[in-house]
Structures are given as C-alpha cells and as structure tokens.
Image (cartoon, rainbow, N blue to C red):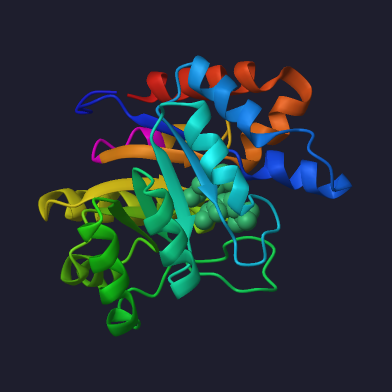
Amino acid sequence: MPGATARLRLGVNIDHVATIRNARGGDHPDPVRAAEIVAACGSDGITAHLREDRRHIRDEDLARIQAATDLPLNLEMAATDEMLAIALRHRPHAACIVPEKREERTTEGGLDAAGQHNHLAPVVARLTDAGIRVSLFIEASERQLEAALRLGAPVVEFHTGEYAHARGEQVSVELKRIADMAALAAKNGIEAHAGHGLTYTNVQPIAAIPQLAELNIGHYLVGEAVFVGLEAAVRRMRELMDHAR
Ligand SMILES: CC(=O)[C@@H](O)[C@H](O)COP(=O)(O)O
Ligand SMILES: NCC(=O)COP(=O)(O)O
C-alpha cells in the first residue's frame, strides 16, 4: 500500500498453546516447541503473557522459551511487585504492561495509564533501568497516549479488541481511531504496536497503518494451527501483512 514504510514485525503470542497443555495438566503441547517453530518460520518475536493466575504460560516456561530461541521475548505482565520481580529476573527484550482482572476471559481493555500514573511510574522506571523495553497496552485514545508519554514509555501497543469486535460502520470508526493514534504516537517519538483479536480477515487494514511497527497475534494463530499447522498459519498471516503494505 502506498505511503507505508518499514516492514511490519510479527510477534507471535504462544499463550494458548499452554492453555491446551494445561487442560490436561501434562507437558504437551509444549509452548517452547511452538516458539521454536515460530522462530524457524520468519516471525520477529515471541509474546507470552504470564498471568497472575498462571492459566496458560507458567514461570518455568519463560526461561525455557528464552533458552530455546534467539527471538526477542515480549513479556506481557500486570504491574504488580511479583511480576516486576519476575521480569527483572528474566530480563526479556520487552515488557508489555497489561491490565489484568482475575475473572476475565481475556484482556478486556487497555491499561488505564492515565488513571494509574503513580502506580505505573516506578514499574516503568525499574524495567527501563534494567534495560527492558517498556510497552503499555492501551486503548487508542489521546488521553492514554499522553499518559504513556508522561510515563516515558518508548512503546505503546494499541488494544485492537474493539476493532476486532466491531461490525458495519463501526469498523471504520475503530480503524480510524487506531490510525490516528498511531500517527500521534509516531509524531511524539513513541513506537506503536497493535494486537488482540486479529485474524486473517481483519488484519490487513491494521497492517496497512504506516506508523505501526509491530503486531502481536496469538489466539487466532493457535486456533488455525489446529487445522493447518503452526508454521502454515504464521506464514499465511505474514503474507497477509506483507500484502497490506
Ligand atoms: C494482553 C493480550 O492481549 C494477550 O495477553 C492475549 O490476549 C492472550 O492472553 P489472554 O487470552 O490470557 O488475554
Ligand atoms: N497483545 C496482544 C497479543 O499478544 C495477542 O492477542 P490475541 O491475538 O491472542 O488476541
């Protein structure tokens, strides 16, 4: 697509390989094997969300993922003392701070970076001091973006859940919101990423937003992998992203 710039990176979220593993309480399928496959087929990073309730990725998975691949690890984490200590111990390439509610089915919305400035500031500072690239998983809104700027986060990831769920005219409204905020992020020197609920069907308009540097995609890819294999699913997503720019 005209006007687009650098190659858009694809981070593959392997959480839901662990969801399937945990359903039987054993060690198969192993998210580490997924990380190896993803690394071998042209992905740019691995994303893993260590939830407080450990419903999918577990503590011991992190070191195993880091040992198995050279791809940068983007650790999604709640801003708690426990998660901060884990991140500082593992030193992933990036830490994406996400909101967490114990009972939610998935990450339902963005982090309230504006309302939680005082809580988030020391977490962002500790991660940054440790050389970890901090990302904030926020809604595409000016208020949240300004808060990310005040917190000194070098990266934001826009939650694309509302876009993914939108139907009819609302799709272009949500898309514009993300495109406008990606442009504003770039103008302010913040690297913009996006993710949540992205699929073969809805990824291309997002991938065409020129200021986005990275997409993180997981649940849909793992679902497709059941039918076509993980490598084929990732390659197809990569192809769609490339054709959008
Ligand atoms: C923050 C986020 O979007 C990811 O964590 C992803 O949705 C997979 O994890 P959950 O399904 O546990 O939310
Ligand atoms: N941060 C979003 C992510 O990692 C993947 O979300 P999903 O594709 O599993 O919905």
Viewed as shown, does residue 48 lie left or right of 178? right
Viewed as shown, does residue 197 lie left or right of 178? right
Residue positioned 78% across, 23% down in the render: 227
Q: Is residue 210 magenta?
A: yes
Position of the C terminus by quadrant:
top left
* Residue 158 vs residue 37, the one in the foreground: 37
Q: Position of residue 26 (x, y in %)?
A: 84, 42
Q: Position of residue 18 (x, y in %)?
A: 70, 43
Write the start and end of the magenta stretch as one range. Answer: 206-211
Above/below status of 143 relative to 199: below
Q: Position of residue 244 (x, y in %)?
A: 38, 25
Q: Is residue 123 magenta?
A: no
Residue positioned 28% across, 84% down in the render: 118
Q: Main secondary structure of the magenta part?
A: loop
Q: Position of residue 49 (x, y in %)?
A: 54, 52
Position of the N terminus by quadrant:
top left
Q: Is residue 12 visible?
A: no
Viewed as shown, does residue 30 lie left or right of 121? right
For this orientation, the residue located farthest to the right is 24
Residue positioned 43% across, 70% down in the render: 79
Residue positioned 64% across, 26% down in the render: 33
